[in-house]
Amino acid sequence: MLDWNNSFAFKDPSAKLGYQKIAGTGGRGTSRFVEIAPQAGQEILMVDDFAALVAKPDANRAAAAHAKATAQTQDYLDTVWAHIQKT
């Protein structure tokens, strides 16, 4: 999720942070905006996550699990994209 409110690049305090929640099959009128309170800028959260990963004694295993999950997600997206391109 892109934080338009606290992001270093955008810094727009009037922007609401949240997401669209879709119900049912996703037809018209089935989504609503759910506002969430910003915690900190994305950059700060990213550095905090990295610092926490490094501070853990099992940081290498956690990093490998992170990388594996990321690769699996990308493989899934690539498969979906390839399927879309065939149709």
Image (cartoon, grey):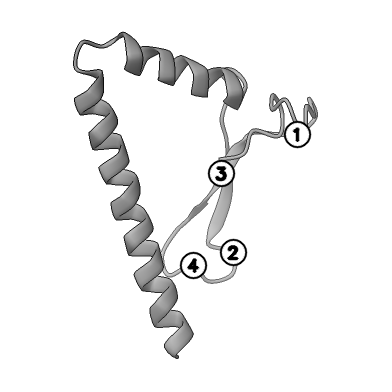
Q: Nearer the viewer, mark 4 or mark 2?
A: 4
- Element under disc 1: loop
The outermost residue toward the front is: 60
Up the image or down, 49 lies above or below 66; here it is above
Q: Which image quadrant is residue 7 in?
A: top right
**One can see residue 13 in this view:** yes
Q: Are marks 1 and 4 in contact (CB under 8 Å)?
A: no
Q: Distance of mark 3 from mark 2, alpha carbons?
A: 15 Å
Identify the mark nearer the N-term, 3 or 2: 3
Identify the mark nearer the N-term, 1 or 2: 1
Which of 60/39 is in front?
60
Q: Distance of mark 1 from mark 2, alpha carbons?
A: 22 Å
Up the image or down, 70 lies above or below 65; here it is below
53 left or right of 44? left
Looking at the rendered structure, the kind of residue marked 2 is Gly
Q: Which image quadrant is residue 75 in?
A: bottom left
* Numbered circle sitting on residue 15: 1
Up the image or down, 54 lies above or below 82; here it is above
Q: Nearer the viewer, mark 1 or mark 4?
A: 1
Look at mark 4 in the image and give the residue it sits on: 26
Q: Distance of mark 3 from mark 1, alpha carbons?
A: 12 Å
